[in-house]
Amino acid sequence: MLSPELVQALRAARHIVASTGAGISAESGVPTFRDAQTGLWSQFRPEELATPEAFQQNPKLVWDWYAWRRELVGRAEPNPGHRALAALEGIVPRFTLITQNVDSLHRRAGSRDVLELHGNILQARCSSEGTLVAEWEDTAETPPRCPSCNGLLRPNVVWFGEALPADALARAFMASRTCDVFLSIGTSTAIAPASSLPFEAQAAGALVVELNPDTTPLTRQADHVLRGPAGELLPLLVAALTAG
Ligand code: OAD
């Protein structure tokens, strides 16, 4: 499955970047964005709910959608793909984990340093003051109110049209430009700026490896393509790195 050249490059790497998308959590039962959603929410496209405009027009609808997703994520467990990446943190001389996911499954699998480019669904923040709120009371009225200013709470995630957390983004670009190997895992590479990271890495001389069961805009340009689910491929990759 892993070519000898790839195994050699992984073993020689001083700095590996792994950048993950919704696909890595698919095997934990968290639906990806561009797959059909189920049930009540199948009639809404994420692009229509994950915007500041949608929240302004219908805060209850948007909050309830995120509450549904928060519950789903809370019931999910990290899978062997998440755990393999947590193991890599202790194996590779320098390892940077970047994720577009908001589900906390990397942290729950044991990864300590995670650059969350799109925020975290388990947190909320005040929509008027911006203050982070880690815990809140679910009220009959949704969204709940900010305990200090009574403004509406919103999920602490990045919506379409909003800026990404500047510090995490800067660190992600810096790591991509200085790594030896860049692993693009379970992302459709459809949403900028995260989608540009593997191209930045390659332009700076890194080897780019895609792990995905399907073709993406990155596939043609990747140096190695590993076809299959992340939960199967990543443990193989860790085994190849640690063997003998
Ligand atoms: P997508 O839903 O666009 O893509 C998921 C990718 O995972 C696809 O390329 C699938 O082929 C792949 N995939 C599915 N099952 C997999 C598995 N078991 N192992 C590995 N890969 C698998 O999700 P993202 O690329 O993460 O942004 O989407 C990027 C962003 O678009 C999201 O963070 C979100 C969304 O709109 C915001 O909410 C700001």
Image (spheres, grey):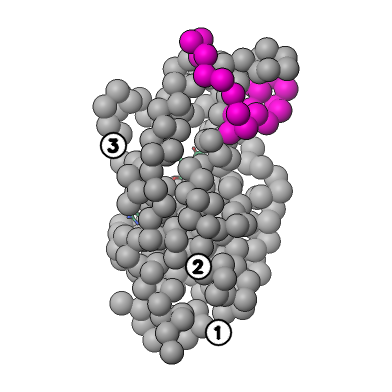
> Quick one: label 1, few (<14), some, or many (20+) residues within 10 Å?
some
Identify residue for label 3: 36
Q: Amino acid at mark 2?
A: Ala
Q: Nearer the viewer, mark 2 or mark 3?
A: 2
Residue 242's place in the image compared with 244, above or below, is above
Q: Amino acid at mark 3?
A: Ala
Identify residue for label 1: 12
In this rendered view, identify the residue nearer to me: 72 or 226: 72
Give the Cα distance between marks 1 and 2. 17 Å
Give the Cα distance between marks 2 and 3. 32 Å
- Residue 48 is situated, as x and y percent measured from the top left of the image, at 43, 26
Identify residue for label 2: 87
**To which quarter of the image does residue 79 belong?**
bottom left
Identify the main secondary structure in magenta: loop
Of label 2 and label 3, which has the lower sequence position? 3
As for residue 126 lying within the magenta part, the answer is yes
The answer to whether one can see residue 197 in this image is no
Q: Amino acid at mark 1?
A: Ala
SS state under label 3: loop
